[in-house]
Image (cartoon, rainbow, N blue to C red):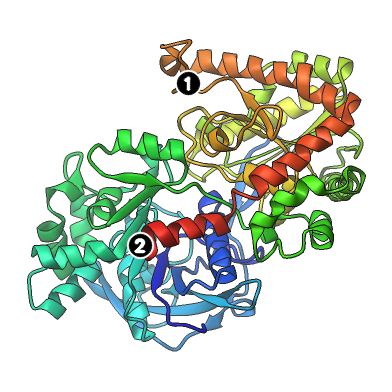
Amino acid sequence: MSSKPTVAYFSMEIGLDPAVPTYSGGLGMLAGDSLRAAADLKLPMVAVTLVHRRGYFYQRLDHDGNQIEEPVDWALDDYLKPLEQRVTVILRGRPVHIAAWQYNAVGATGFTVPVFLLDTDLPENAPDDRDITHYLYGGDSNYRLLQETVLGVGGVRMLRALGLTDFSRYHMNEGHAALLVLELLKEEAEAKQAAPADPPVMDAVRQRCVFTTHTPVEAGHDKFPIELVQDILEPELMQILTSAGGKESLCCGGMLNMTFLGFNLSHYINGVAKRHGQVSRQMFGHYPIDAITNGVHSTTWTSPWIAALFDKHIPGWREDTACLRYAMSLDPNEFWESHMEAKQHLVEEINRETNAGFDRDVFTIGFARRATAYKRPGLILADIDRLKRISNEVGPVQLVFAGKAHPHDDPGKQIIRTIINACRALRPEIRAVYLANYDVEYCRLMVGGADLWLNTPEPPMEASGTSGMKAAVNGVPSLSILDGWWLEGCIEGVTGWAIGTDPMNNPSNENAAKTNSDDRRRQDAESLYAKLENVIVPMFYRERSRYINIMRHAIAINGSFFTTQRMMYSYVTKAYFE
């Protein structure tokens, strides 16, 4: 780095490279995009995560749609540089030695943000301790707490071993790293020769900590039985937790809530979209929760053909993504040719993998999210007969789905099976596929090559969502539920289309927010089909110039704004250097 780092960014997962499986989905890709944007902007940062030697998992799908999880094998030293430094954390009463690897996120001008990936797979560790950093989100609560202790406590100690001591901010990207506050309290108490619970000590730590919460779903906030915490944590850190954390860090009958622990010792807390900030304030009562809407790293997610068009007509867009507002000046025919190149590559990959006979000239809808119930990935398949009628009478449609279910999410796995069976039921009228092992490369193909991006979460459970942002920078408009970022990005008929109405802000129906899930699903499915049948598909086939105009607006309005460059500027002014 060319300047002294002042921000340390902690995240359980970070998407660094397509071949480095240290991410599971949106949270990890956001972290990677954040660091790439920080490098573009020459922000003095470092990041800490775990090495995840076996990745999240490699997804295979059998003929019946059953998800089969396999470890990911990858050569660490092909992508990461081993470091000499070692630190130790006492876990379950015995020392666990921690090494680190380094990856450099490189910005548009060559500036680097180093990422340190912690690793316990060392010969000097006990066999049970060597696999702590093997699997992302693997194992049980015991395994997760061991990982989170290595990340938070071990991460701070590794930074010290590397000679990095004077950070003005420690940014916790979700609660997985919240135990770092205990190590900071320990350091601050020793420096001030005071007790960790003394107000000056706690205030000093609080002033240096930032916490970003990413989910309005209760299950997304880690909680651990206090007996398990006592068994795993170093006694000194456990004493700090009970004295400095106080009762507010414990909830629900003797459980350590990692979100509350991070909240209590952070001077700035934010959600990841304006609506998510509102929902989080309702969830967490007296905590002052702001909002910084997520973004995506434009250079990473723009297809090569659209990027070449930008390079030709919008010079400087890589360094300053706000320049993409000039996309409205792109020649419609030249833009369409670039989009069709991206679409051709998506179609070729689908046909190579699935032999589905996809056609480049057919209207293509993309959906790729984690397969879980609240994201409702099967909403468009609620009425297969109607979908067939739209395709036969209005204009042909083809569908491409992708996404992994968490290994312990049986309902999510059932969703994948249901979608795959529905895809078969759509034939021969509609070609539809579910791509296995959705990853960065598939994401790039889909967000660049689809004609429409579909997003159907049950509101208000979408914190932000970034897949539609990735599509927007490629000129692919969204058809989405009004939740998360789409409440800010949707201009009806200009940047895309809304499914239904906003249930939390609907003066015509005071009971809209109380509509039960089944009724909302029926209403949303009806709205989705109506938009496809009466607006979107007819426009695509019969008023192509209007559709292209919406595509250019998607870039100029949403692609230029929902970027990690804009997002990181907000963190700088609100959280890091205010």
Where is residue 300? Give x, y as percent.
Answer: 68, 60
- Residue located 51% across and 23% down the image: 502
Q: Is residue 75 visible?
A: yes
The answer to whether residue 198 is left or right of residue 83 is left
Q: Amino acid at mark 1?
A: Pro
- Which of the two discs, 1 and 2, labels the residue nearer the N terminus? 1
Q: Label 1, secondary structure: give it.
A: loop
Q: Quadrant of the C terminus?
A: bottom left
Corner quadrant of residue 167? bottom left
Marks 1 and 2 sit apart, C-alpha to C-alpha, by 35 Å
The residue under label 1 is 503
Of residues 243 and 62, the one drawn nearer to the viewer in this rendering: 243
> In this rendering, is residue 516 above or below 79?
above
Corner quadrant of residue 285? top left
Where is residue 207? Give x, y as percent.
Answer: 25, 63
- Residue located 36% across and 78% down the image: 158
> In this rendering, is residue 6 above or below 482?
below
Of residues 504 and 181, the one drawn nearer to the viewer in this rendering: 504
The answer to whether residue 541 is left or right of residue 175 is right
Neighbor class of circle 1 (other Cα within 10 Å; few <14, some 14-19, many 20+) is: some
For marks 1 and 2, give the one nearer the viewer: 2
Q: Amino acid at mark 2?
A: Glu
> In this rendering, is residue 577 above or below 483?
below
Q: Label 2, secondary structure: give it.
A: loop
Corner quadrant of residue 171? bottom left
The answer to whether residue 88 is left or right of residue 23 is left
Neighbor class of circle 2 (other Cα within 10 Å; few <14, some 14-19, many 20+) is: few
Of all residues shown, which one is farthest toward the bottom? 84
The residue under label 2 is 578
Where is residue 232? Give x, y as percent.
Answer: 24, 63
